[in-house]
């Protein structure tokens, strides 16, 4: 299964599970579940030196998702008008799924922003 298929399957799993049981549990449980699914999918791409290294990998990115998901969800919700609570699961999943590729993601975002502002500064 390719990365795109696995990511799509993981996001579908998170969306379905959130819809079915999201109202019964606190947002923290949903964030933990979504981030765990994302981190486990991401774990399939990295080389680890054993089970403890794999556990540490998942723990790092689940903890990062717990720490960042609420703030990012609020920020996205503020600018899109979507309720932040409904964005928590997908944001947590994406944080876990990106895993150790954050350097590449931030580089792409910065390059895109620079290209946008350079194009905007050249006039109409």
Image (cartoon, helix red, strand yellow):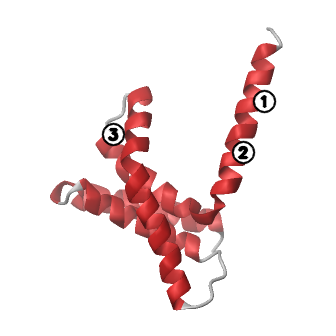
Instruction: Specify the quadrant that holds the N terminus.
Output: bottom right
Q: Residue furthest right?
A: 122
The x, y position of residue 55, in whole percent, is 48, 81
The x, y position of residue 78, in whole percent, is 39, 29
Instruction: Specify the quadrant that holds the C terminus.
Output: top right
Q: Residue at x 16, y 59 (%)?
A: 24
| CA distance for labels 1 and 3 | 29 Å
Q: Earlier in the sequence, mark 1 or mark 3?
A: 3
Q: Residue at x 36, y 46 (%)?
A: 70
Q: Earlier in the sequence, mark 2 or mark 3?
A: 3
The answer to which image quadrant residue 6 occupies is bottom right
In the displayed structure, 106 sits above or below 4; it is above
Q: Earlier in the sequence, mark 1 or mark 2?
A: 2
The x, y position of residue 107, in whole percent, is 72, 47
The answer to which image quadrant residue 81 occupies is top left
Drawn side of residue 49 relative to residue 67, left or right: right
The residue identified by callout 1 is 115
The residue identified by callout 3 is 84
Q: Residue at x 54, y 62 (%)?
A: 97
The x, y position of residue 111, in whole percent, is 75, 38
Of residues 11 and 111, the one nearer the viewer is 111
Q: Secondary structure at mark 1?
A: helix
Of residues 46 and 82, the one nearer the viewer is 46
The residue identified by callout 2 is 108
């Amino acid at each position: 299964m390719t990365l795109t298929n696995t990511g799509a399957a993981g996001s579908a799993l998170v969306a379905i599970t959130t819809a079915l049981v999201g109202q019964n549990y606190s947002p923290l449980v949903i964030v933990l579940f979504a981030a765990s699914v994302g981190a486990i999918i991401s774990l399939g791409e990295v080389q680890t030196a054993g089970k403890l290294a794999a556990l540490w990998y998942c723990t790092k990115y689940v903890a990062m998702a717990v720490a960042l998901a609420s703030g990012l969800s609020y920020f996205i919700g503020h600018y899109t008008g979507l309720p932040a609570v409904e964005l928590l699961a997908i944001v947590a999943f994406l944080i876990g799924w990106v895993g150790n590729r954050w350097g590449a993601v931030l580089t792409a975002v910065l390059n895109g922003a620079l290209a946008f502002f350079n194009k905007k500064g050249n006039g109409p």
